[in-house]
C-alpha cells in the first residue's frame, strides 16, 4: 500500500511541473525565437594583416553551435562565436557568414548576413627604372612597373629629389638629352585603395656624355722596310655621337691636309725613314686620336745590290731560282768562267745531329687517336719498369726495349734504358729542365702539346738510338714520332720523345753522361710535337712542310739556348750549299744537314725582318697554311703587301752575304749571324730546284746569257 502511494506522489509531481511549464509557454505565446543581434561586418584589409568576424545571439535554448562559411562552404574548425584569419592573402577574399544552431528540440537554426572580406595586396615595384648613359642629343626613357594595391596608380617622377612637373606616367622620357639632365631619377607610386599605399622606386642614374671625339684605326699600310716607291694607306673612322666631317693627313710632320676618303697613296718619297699620320674631325669640331705609320724606304737597287740587269754590276753574282716548285729544275744560265780565286769547299768534318722523318700510315685519322684509359690513371713510382717500342734506324721496323722510371716531373716522366748510366739525380736534372725551361718557352712561343692518354705528361725515353753512328758524321740525337699518338699495335700510345744517349749525352763513348747536352734536342723535338698537335689534330689539316717545321724547331732551340753555331758552321763549309742546295726541297742532293742549316738561317732571317720578336713563330704556326704561304702572309702583313715569297728568298740569299744592319739585305743588326759566310760556286752553270741558289765571285759585272730558266733571278753584289 505504501509503494503504491509513493508512485502516485511522483506522478502527481511530474504533472504539476508539466502544467507549470505549459502555463508559462502559453502565457508567452511559445519559445523565444533564436535571433542574431549583432551581424558579422564587411571589411577591407591589407595583405599580411588579420581579419575578425563575430556574431551575438539571443533566444532559443543555449548552448549554441556555430559553423562559419566562406562563399557558402563550411570552413573546417571554424565553430566559435568569432572567426579570426591571420596573415591575410588574396585567397582570403570572399563572402563570410555563420550558421547558428540552438539546443532546443527540434533545433532552431539561423544564418547571419553576409560579410564581404576584400584583401588588398601590398603595392610593390616589380621593374625598377634602369641607369643609362646617353650622349647629348639622344633620347632616354625611364620605365617603372608596379603590382598590388588598387588601380589606377598615380605616379610622380623626381630628379635629384625634386618633383618633375607633368611627369605622372609609368614612363618618363627626355627626347633631347642635355648635360643638365644628368642626375638621379626615381618615381613615387600611389595606389587607389582606401589605404593609399605609396612606394618609391630605386634611383636610376642618367650619365650624359659630352661630345665624344671620333676614332680612327688602321686597316692596311706599310710597316718596317719597304722597297716600292709608292704605297697606299687605308684606315677607318667612327663617331659614336655624331658624324665625321673630314679626315686629315700629314707626311713627315708637315702640315695637316684635309681629305674625305679613307685611303691615300703616297708616291715619290725619298730613301730613308718616313711617317704618315691620319686624324678625323667630327661635326662638333673634336679631333680623333692620331694613327701613325712608320716605315723605311730602301730601294732594292742600292749601291751594293743590282737586281735590274741585263748587266749586273758587282764582284759577286747570285743566281736564285724564285720558284716554289721543287719538282722542276731550271738552268742557272751560262756563267762566266772568269772569277776571282776562291776556296774549294768540302763537306765539313765533325758530328752533326738530325731528325729521322719516319713515315706515317696512310690510314691515319683523328678517329684512330689514342683515348684516355684507366691505365693512364695508375700511379707510377720511381723504379717502375716498362716496355717501349723503339725504331731501328738501320734496318727499319720497331722493336721493344725495357726502361726504368728514374724521375717524375710536373710535365714529364724520365724513362731510362740503362739506369746505371743515367741515375735518378741526372734524370731529375733532365725533368727539371723540361718542366721549368723548355715547356714554358715552347708553349709560349709556339703551341701546346696534345694529351691523348690523359696523363698530362710527356714521356722522355733515354736510350742509345741505333742509327749506325760510327764516330763521325751525322747521327740521330732524338726524335718525336706522331705514330705513338695513334692506336696501333706497336704504338706506345702516349706523347713520347726518344732521346739518344750516345753520342748525344756523351762523346767519345768513354766520357761520362752529361744530360745537359740533350737539352737543345729536347726543345727541338717538343716544337715538333706541339706543331703536329696544332696542324694535324686541332686544325685537322696536314703537318707543316719539313723545311718550315725544322726551321721552327731550331728557332725553339735558338730562343732557349742561343745561337746554333754548328748549323752556321756546316753552312759555311758545305759544298752542297755552294753547289745550289734548295731551301724548300728537304734532303736536296742527299744532304739533310745542309737543309738544317738553311732552314735555321731562313727562319732567323724571317724573325729579324718582321721585327715582331719571337712571337712571329707562333703567328706562322697558327696560320692555316702550313707551307711557304704562311711565311708569305707574314711578309704581306709586316713588310710589303706586294713582295712575294720567291723574291724574299732571293733577298735572304743576299742577306747571308751582306748582313746589312737595315733593309732586306741583312739581319737588322742581329750580331748572332755575323759569322755566316756563304760558300761560293766554282762552276759555269747548273740546274737549280725551286728555292735553290748559287753565289759566285765575278770580275766586276755579269751580263744575262739568255739561256737561264724563267724563274732565275740574278743579282750583282758589291761586297
Image: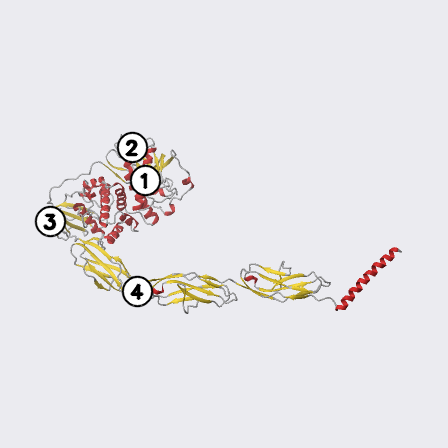
The residue at the point 38 percent across, 47 percent down is: 367
Task: Name the residue tied to disc 3.
Answer: 701
Of residues 43 and 275, the one nearer the viewer is 43
SS class, disc 4 = loop
Task: Name the residue tied to disc 2.
Answer: 513
Say whether residue 180 is left or right of residue 700: right
Query: Which picture quadrant has residue 369?
Result: top left
First in sequence, mark 3 or 4: give its number.
4
Of residues 516 and 473, the one nearer the viewer is 516
Of residues 638 and 71, the one nearer the viewer is 71
Label 2, label 3: how far apart the Cα atoms are: 55 Å
Residue 583 visible in the shown view:
no
Label 3, label 4: how far apart the Cα atoms are: 63 Å
First in sequence, mark 1 or 3: give its number.
1
First in sequence, mark 2 or 4: give its number.
4
How far from the left and from the top, in percent, is residue 306? 14, 51
Q: Residues within 10 Å of mark 2 (few under 14, many from 20)?
A: some
Amino acid at each position: 500500500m505504501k509503494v503504491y502511494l509513493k508512485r502516485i506522489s511522483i506522478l502527481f509531481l511530474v504533472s504539476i511541473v508539466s502544467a507549470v511549464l505549459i502555463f508559462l509557454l502559453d502565457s508567452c505565446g511559445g519559445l523565444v525565437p533564436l535571433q542574431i543581434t549583432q551581424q558579422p561586418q564587411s571589411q577591407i584589409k591589407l595583405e599580411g594583416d588579420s581579419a575578425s568576424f563575430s556574431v551575438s545571439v539571443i533566444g532559443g535554448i543555449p548552448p549554441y553551435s556555430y559553423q562559419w562559411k566562406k562563399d557558402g562552404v563550411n570552413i573546417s574548425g571554424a565553430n566559435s562565436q568569432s572567426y579570426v584569419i591571420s596573415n591575410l592573402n588574396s585567397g582570403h577574399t570572399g563572402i563570410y557568414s555563420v550558421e547558428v544552431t540552438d539546443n532546443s528540440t527540434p533545433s532552431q537554426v539561423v544564418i547571419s548576413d553576409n560579410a564581404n572580406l576584400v584583401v588588398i595586396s601590398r603595392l610593390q615595384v616589380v621593374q625598377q627604372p634602369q641607369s643609362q648613359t646617353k650622349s647629348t642629343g639622344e633620347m632616354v626613357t625611364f620605365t617603372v612597373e608596379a603590382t598590388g594595391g588598387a588601380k589606377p596608380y598615380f605616379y610622380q617622377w623626381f630628379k635629384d629629389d625634386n618633383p618633375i612637373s607633368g611627369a605622372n606616367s609609368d614612363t618618363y622620357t627626355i627626347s633631347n638629352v642635355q648635360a643638365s639632365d644628368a642626375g638621379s631619377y626615381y618615381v613615387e607610386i600611389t595606389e587607389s585603395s582606401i589605404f593609399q599605399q605609396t612606394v618609391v622606386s630605386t634611383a636610376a642614374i642618367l650619365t650624359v656624355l659630352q661630345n665624344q671625339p671620333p676614332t680612327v684605326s688602321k686597316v692596311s699600310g706599310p710597316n718596317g722596310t719597304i722597297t716600292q716607291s709608292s704605297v697606299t694607306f687605308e684606315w677607318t673612322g667612327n663617331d659614336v655621337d655624331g658624324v665625321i666631317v673630314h679626315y686629315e693627313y700629314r707626311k713627315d710632320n708637315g702640315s695637316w691636309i684635309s681629305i674625305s676618303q679613307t685611303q691615300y697613296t703616297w708616291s715619290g718619297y725619298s730613301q730613308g725613314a718616313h711617317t704618315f699620320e691620319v686624324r678625323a674631325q667630327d661635326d662638333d669640331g673634336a679631333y680623333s686620336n692620331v694613327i701613325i705609320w712608320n716605315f723605311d724606304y730602301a730601294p732594292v737597287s742600292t749601291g751594293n745590290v743590282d737586281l735590274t740587269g741585263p748587266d749586273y754590276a758587282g764582284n759577286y753574282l747570285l743566281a736564285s731560282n724564285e720558284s716554289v716548285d721543287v719538282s722542276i729544275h731550271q738552268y742557272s744560265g751560262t756563267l762566266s768562267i772568269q772569277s776571282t780565286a776562291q776556296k774549294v769547299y768540302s763537306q765539313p768534318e765533325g758530328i752533326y745531329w738530325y731528325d729521322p722523318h719516319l713515315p706515317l700510315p696512310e690510314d691515319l685519322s683523328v678517329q684512330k687517336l689514342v683515348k684516355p684509359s684507366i691505365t693512364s690513371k695508375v700511379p707510377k713510382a720511381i723504379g717502375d719498369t716498362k716496355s717501349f717500342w723503339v725504331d731501328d734506324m738501320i734496318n727499319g721496323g720497331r722493336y721493344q726495349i725495357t726502361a726504368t722510371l728514374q724521375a717524375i716531373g710536373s710535365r714529364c716522366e724520365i724513362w731510362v734504358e740503362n739506369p746505371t748510366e743515367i741515375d735518378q739525380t741526372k734524370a731529375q736534372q733532365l725533368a727539371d729542365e723540361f718542366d721549368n725551361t723548355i715547356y714554358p718557352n715552347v708553349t709560349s712561343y709556339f703551341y701546346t702539346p696534345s694529351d691523348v692518354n690523359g696523363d698530362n705528361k710527356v714521356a722522355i725515353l733515354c736510350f742509345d738510338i741505333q742509327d749506325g753512328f760510327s764516330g763521325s758524321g751525322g747521327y740521330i740525337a732524338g726524335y718525336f714520332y706522331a705514330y705513338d699518338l695513334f692506336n696501333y699495335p706497336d704504338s706506345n700510345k702516349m706523347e713520347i720523345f726518344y732521346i739518344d744517349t750516345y753520342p748525344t749525352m756523351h762523346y767519345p763513348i768513354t766520357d761520362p753522361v752529361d744530360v745537359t747536352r740533350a737539352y737543345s734536342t729536347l726543345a727541338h723535338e717538343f716544337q715538333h710535337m706541339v706543331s703536329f698537335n696544332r696542324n694535324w689534330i686541332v686544325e685537322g689539316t696536314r703537318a707543316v712542310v719539313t723545311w718550315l717545321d725544322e726551321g721552327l724547331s731550331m728557332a725553339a732551340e735558338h730562343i732557349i739556348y742561343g745561337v746554333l753555331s754548328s748549323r752556321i758552321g756546316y753552312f759555311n763549309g758545305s759544298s752542297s750549299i755552294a753547289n745550289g742546295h734548295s731551301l724548300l726541297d728537304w734532303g736536296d742532293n742527299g744532304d739533310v744537314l745542309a737543309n738544317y742549316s738553311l732552314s735555321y738561317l731562313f727562319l732567323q732571317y724571317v724573325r729579324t725582318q718582321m721585327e715582331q720578336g719571337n712571337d712571329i713563330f707562333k703567328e706562322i704556326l697558327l696560320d692555316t697554311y702550313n707551307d711557304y704561304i704562311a711565311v708569305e702572309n707574314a711578309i704581306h702583313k709586316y713588310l710589303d703587301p706586294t713582295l712575294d715569297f720567291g723574291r724574299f728568298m732571293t733577298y735572304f740569299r743576299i742577306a747571308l752575304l751582306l748582313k746589312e744592319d737595315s733593309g732586306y739585305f741583312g739581319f737588322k743588326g742581329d750580331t748572332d749571324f755575323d759569322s755566316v759566310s756563304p760558300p761560293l760556286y766554282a762552276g759555269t752553270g747548273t740546274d737549280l730546284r725551286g728555292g735553290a741558289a748559287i753565289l759566285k765571285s765575278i770580275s766586276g759585272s755579269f751580263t744575262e746569257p739568255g739561256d737561264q730558266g724563267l724563274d732565275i733571278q740574278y743579282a750583282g753584289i758589291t761586297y
